[in-house]
Image (cartoon, rainbow, N blue to C red):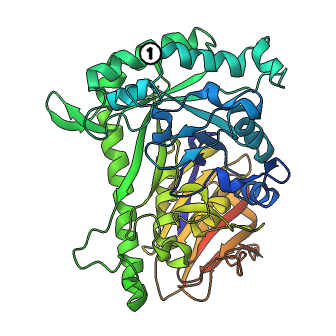
Amino acid sequence: MIAVDPKPLFAVSPHLYMQFMEPLGATDSSVEAGWDYEINDWREDFVAATRELAPQTMRWGGLFCRYYRWREGIGPVAKRPTMRNYVWGGIESNRVGTHEFAAFCKRVGAAPLMCVNFQGDGFQTYRNKPEGDRTAGPEEAADWVSYCNDPDHRERAANGSREPLPIQLWQLGNETSYGRGGFTLDETVKATIEFSKAMRGRDASIQLIGWGDRGETAAGRGLWAAELAKRAGEHIDMIAMHMMGQSPIRKDTVLRGYEYQKDPARAWEELLELAGRVDVRLREFEHAIPPGDSSHGIAVTEGHLSLQPHNANPILTEWLSAAYHAKSLNTYLRHGGRVKICTGADFAGNRWTVNAVMMQTPGKSSHLLPVGSITRLFRRYHGTHGAAVTGAPAALDVAATVGIDSVLLHVLNTDFTSPVKAAFRVPGRRIAAGVVHEIAPAEARAYADTQHPKTFEPVEKTLAVTPGAPVEWTFPARSVSAVILTTLKEANA
């Protein structure tokens, strides 16, 4: 029995399902591979695949933002300077900048989120590069807000956009606490307040995301979220963390290289174990924010599996990886009272298997990897408010949302070999109709590639609803489903 209490618990964030785009230099051409220089625009196949993915939010930045100077990516293309990509290698053309990114977001229906240069996250190395000072302070970030959002901004109009872009979501830096040599916690708090005042001085309506993940504190290594909320909470709306370092737990893991191919069932078990750590991390982060503080949402602005070979493990192209992806996405939704943004993968590229979208280069073909297909399914079918699952078979991992007259379920059958049959129950409601959108490959190692781009297309099936009989469904082994139940209020409820 899958039982759901239809009482709305929290509003599901309109920015929940996020992807992020970052110029990754010589490592993975996430931006350059997506740009078609023949038509001087985004690749049509890339735009089409992203529309299928349907991200609610798209983030620009990452480590790249520590040395990104936004003005280099605006104005006449021929006059834009190139820049060295210090983290990812190679030279960036700046052909894609603020206007191009905002236009892409508009075409795919995503809200843009800009990650600003937060004084290089405090890393002094970026102040003294041969190319000059690559860090930027509050004023430069504020100028970027004005450029994007000021209705009467002359420079933006001169560059071809009379109307505001506009951009409401902004993140201050990226992974500020990671590594040695960057800002301390005290310096981060101070800079957060300075940047917020400057940026909101240009547009008070913007939403700001500060950094609160693990770093050095006065008491040793710990989360920064509590102190950031306490000392700079009035200046930010969300606190960011990254769900990185999701590496194998077992010493004799099969999740390195091609070892998983010898024992797919064992790999499935290990991936479920890894997904369980997402819940542990989120609970730790929630508890770190001061008790009673419900004003600050959690923004997981990056996150993916960390398997060897780094960023290129072949299991991520196969359905086996659904164990981690579906369970972790369900976890984010269950924590949706606090989690306002979640990220299950890098966005797009032509080499990395941690991406949601894979682009063939050279070529004109883009397809979704398993994480992209699952994200698309869950993104398409969810309600407006979270709801509690009060009962479910042990093998089914279920997250629930509700609409006006509907209950929507995201279901992962964690059983590797057996289907699981379950009846649906919604107290006080009668199930009048139902539809299941199901991804259930016959083979655990089914995969997506340029020759098989539609392997993980969901199949729509209708639930049998007979008056007086239980409404039931059998979830195939290793399947991921979105269930939509149309419900009517019972007369005696």
Q: Residue visible at 54% across and 78% down?
A: 318
Q: Amino acid at mark 1?
A: Glu
The number of discs equals 1
Of 411 and 469, the residue lying toward us: 411
Identity of the residue drawn at 80% across and 44% down:
107
The reply to whether residue 472 is visible in this rendering is yes
- Image side of residue 189 versus residue 199, left or right: left
Give the x, y percent position of residue 76. 77, 29
Q: Is residue 214 left or right of residue 162?
A: left
| Residue 342 x, y percent position in the rendering | 52, 47
The correct choice, above or below, for 319 with respect to 229 in the image is: below
**Does 147 appear above or below 390?**
above
From the image, tell me which residue sits under label 1. Answer: 234
Residue 456 x/y as whole percent = 67, 75
Answer few, some or many: residues within 10 Å of disc 1's Cα (few below 14, many 20 plus, some between 14 and 19): few
484 or 86: nearer the viewer: 86
Label 1 sits on a secondary structure element that is helix
Q: Quarter-wise, where is residue 227 in the image?
A: top left
- Could one spot residue 22 in this view of the protein? no
- Where residue 92 sits: x, y (%)? 59, 43
